[in-house]
Image (cartoon, rainbow, N blue to C red):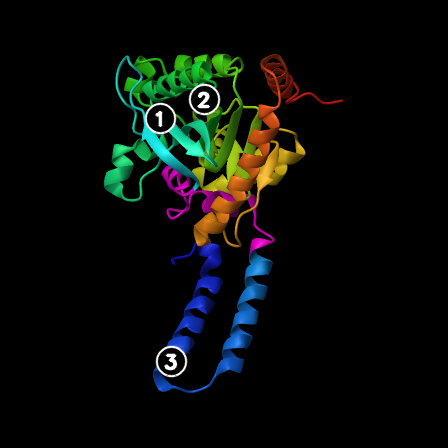
Amino acid sequence: MAGLEFEKPIVELEKKIQELKNFISEKKINLSPEVKRLEEKLEHLKKDTYANLTAWQKVQIARHPLRPYTLDYINTLMTDFVQLHGDRAFADDKALITGLAKFEGQKVAVIGHQKGRDTKENLKRNFGCAHPEGYRKALRIMRLAEQAGLPVLLFIDTPGAYPGIGAEERGQSQAIAENLREMVNIAVPLIATVIGEGGSGGALGIGVADRVFVLENSYYSVISPEGCAAILWKDGGRAPDAAEVLKLTAQDLLGMGIIDEIIPEPSGGAHRDPQVMAKNLKEALFRNLNELKNLNKERLLELRYKKFRSIGVFA
């Protein structure tokens, strides 16, 4: 697996261990002590590296091209998924997936950003940057879920809403603002999870929920580090500095009370063991869904309102 820049020593050592194992298998000789020594060295190296990640390094992991996306979690955690398309006004936005499914035997609505695995799919899905019709589609599905009494699971993974002229002409800011207003009053449990990038209004457009989770190496921010650096210092190259200033890591966000829970990732990131990542996410979703199901409509909406009103308040 190709590593990020700061992971090169880990990748090189993993490659060396694999080459040694191949040599042992081919030559039928016993070099087990040497393999064990290298594997112990690898574990120490991983522990030291991933325990001391900078904010910028976590942003890089959040953007890893092999990181699980919304459809990966749908296929792993859910059954009977039926995708629903279109905003009934303009088009079907491929950057936002919406539909109905079963999660642990319970019917749910599912909404999430979807990036592509290659250039062709990324162009089709607009690199996970939704247009206004995407946010209108999402709101349509949330209202449908409310009518049917279904909880909604939301997966956030976008650099931001698409900033193009066409999107602005079709009311990008209005579509996101309407979602913020309406989601406060959707009278079914809403759980939002930032699974990769949580960029700006593009993330917030499906981010008003009773529970907000962030995967351990994901980020959630008012602006991308590159955008912040370009505005503050007129230098996009200072993105690592901006990442530190923005306090965008899961740990920072939990400390400020902006999110409710950090979902642990496998060592090195969700892409290194998607099955373990899915298991960790499933546990958190199931536990919180069961808690929220016990609240009546009035209490659910009251707590949601208080949750977001308290953000930014300090003594």
- Residue 8 place in picture, x, y as percent: 45, 61
The amino acid sitting under disc 2 is Gly
Residue under label 3: 25
- Residue 249 place in picture, x, y as percent: 57, 39
x 26%, y 35%: residue:
123
x 47%, y 58%: residue:
7
- Residue 303 place in picture, x, y as percent: 64, 18
Quick check: 138 left or right of 122? right
Q: Residues within 10 Å of mark 2 (few under 14, many from 20)?
A: many
Quick check: 302 left or right of 233? right
- Mark in the foreground, 3 or 1: 3
Residue under label 1: 130
Instruction: Give the residues drawn in magenta, as a range.
Output: 50-76
Q: Which residue is at the far front?
A: 105
Indicate the secondary structure of the residue bearing disc 3. helix
Whether residue 53 is visible here, answered yes or no, is yes
Q: Which mark is residue 205?
A: 2
